Amino acid sequence: MAFHPARRLGAVVLSNSRANLYASISELGLYLLDSSYPLTTIRRPFQVSTVQLHNLAGQYRSEEGDRFEIRVERDQLIFYHPASRADFPAMAITATRFEALGIELGPNTTGQFELDSNARAVSLKWTQSGRTHDYAREPDPNQLSLRVAKNELELVLTGDDPSPYRLEISENLDEWRPADLFPTPNSTVRIPFDAKVPVRFFRAARHSP
Amino acid sequence: MTSTVARFTRLIWMCSGLGCALAVAAAPPSITETVKSRARQRVDYGYNAGISIGLINAEGRDYFSYGRLNFEDPAPVNERTIFEIGSVTKVFTSLLLADAVARGEVGFDQSVQSLLPIDFPIPSGTPEISLVHLATHRSGLPNNPSNLCLDEPYRVFECLGEMALRQFLSGYALPRQPGETWEYSNLGMGLLGFTLAHRFNQTYEQLLRERLLEPMGMKDTQLEIPAALSARVATGHNGVLERPPFRMASLGGRAKSAPPSPICSLSLPTNWAFKPTRSRRPWRKPAAHEGLRLNPGSNRDSAGGWSIYQVDA
């Protein structure tokens, strides 16, 4: 809300977005009162596919132990900084360089990803206040998803952990036999499924169902 | 200081036009295409969910809105949309002080301690912390107390009731004397609202309603969101993330639960002093803003909740 006493002119600009370098609407009100007030050039975000955004998502850690958890929501990359418990939405400058938005970050705070041959991020350079910090991507923890389709159980394992897994089937919950198949990371297998026959699966190294 | 002031020809008071009586202007205002275009860009590029703009002078008003209430609701924002206003609330608190000074009820330089119970632990300083120190972020108090509830980012202020305020202040030593340095302080402004509410034996909300909102016809400005207005409330965002409203402690001591931070819409100033002759209870212009002003001559100044921008000629 602003008022120009000499021109007897008032301006109110409201928005339902947290202020950042570009979401700051103060300058619109000030410009309405005095057109000599400089306006920020609004950068059009680079278009990055959803698939590529997910290739950047993951957990990153610096040598000092600082961490970022990067995820994708509504086709926007979100940098979560656990130490400050804060989410910073990021806008793409290029396919691999993103500007993190947050008034507490200051202007020109960027994350630059380095990709492997599969276009998957392996590291991050975080630049803030003119200083750059390196973060290495950590292996994605494995996730197993299950889906029952007719008489089949579909298992999809994603993640970077190469630990072996076992899948066992039992007729009586006392005696278990190994199943013939189990998904390796980033693969899908289907096994016959009978709702009356229990199955269990666990990481072989830990024996924890 | 004189030479510095001479380099500036125009002043813009930023934050709120609530207490400003306006004289006649030449023509109704018009929001320029440049501003409309910039607002559209911000929304289309994903920087803002929605933006509503109002421009007003003595001859009329102009509105422009663009964007949406939230990602799930395609309803557009408009001049009746209600937004959370967060720290703009500080302007209201400062206006309550200016109004009370204009009424002769308190003084800008009156010590905070003199208005609170004798056992209320205001940190000691030389001079004592005054009302104007709190209103201009020069009390020596930090931005926030250290005993906020940090479990949820948007509820950090919720646990700051009177007991927590007393607890923090009783163990806090000022790092410098009041008046020496500007340091933005949510705590200081909160303490100002608390002190005024205590002085008049009302809650902050009652004081705000009686002295500012009702006289000015600001029906859309509330501390609680009534059911009748809920459909008009825009959801707050951080990028694409939806976020809950900040919840504030009831420092007035009488509210049963922590209210969200105040809300308002562009349609608020129905009794604004732009048309003082039509107002049944015309707004009385607060005492001189100069009494709240500090650092005259700098290119960005603060005056009791307002930021003052001085634009080079």
Image: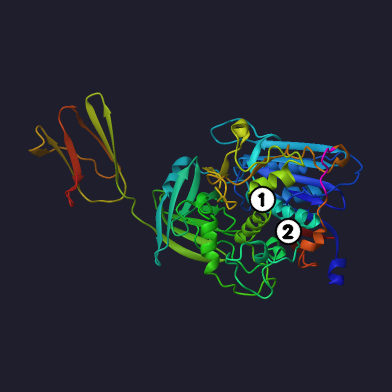
Q: Is residue A11 left or right of residue B239?
A: right
**Predominant secondary structure in magenta?**
loop
What kind of element bears circle 1? helix
Q: Position of residue B256 (x, y in %)?
A: 53, 44
What kind of element bears circle 2? loop
- Residue shown at 44% from the left, 51% from the top: A70
Q: Position of residue B118 (x, y in %)?
A: 61, 66
Q: Does the segment drawn in magenta span residue B280?
A: yes
Can I make out residue B235 in this image? yes
Q: Position of residue B64 (x, y in %)?
A: 74, 37
Boundaries of the magenta span: B279-284
Q: Position of residue B63 (x, y in %)?
A: 76, 37
Give B313 or B112, whichever is nearer the viewer: B112
Q: Quadrant of residue B289?
A: bottom right
- Residue shown at 69% from the left, 51% from the top: A41
**Which residue is disc 1 drawn over?**
B89
Q: Quadrant of residue B199?
A: bottom right
| Residue at the left extreme of this rendering | A175
The disc label shown at residue B168, or none: none
- Residue shown at 80% from the left, 54% from the top: B103
Give B99 or A29, whichever is nearer the viewer: B99
Q: Is residue B196 left or right of residue B272?
A: left
Identified by mark 2, the residue type is Gly
Q: Chain of mark 1?
A: B
Q: Does the segment drawn in magenta span residue B133?
A: no
Give B266 or A84, whichever is nearer the viewer: B266
Identified by mark 1, the residue type is Thr
How many C-alpha atoms fall within 10 Å of the one at disc 2: few (<14), some, or many (≥20)? many
The disc label shown at residue B304, or none: 2
Q: Are marks 1 and 2 in contact (CB under 8 Å)?
A: no
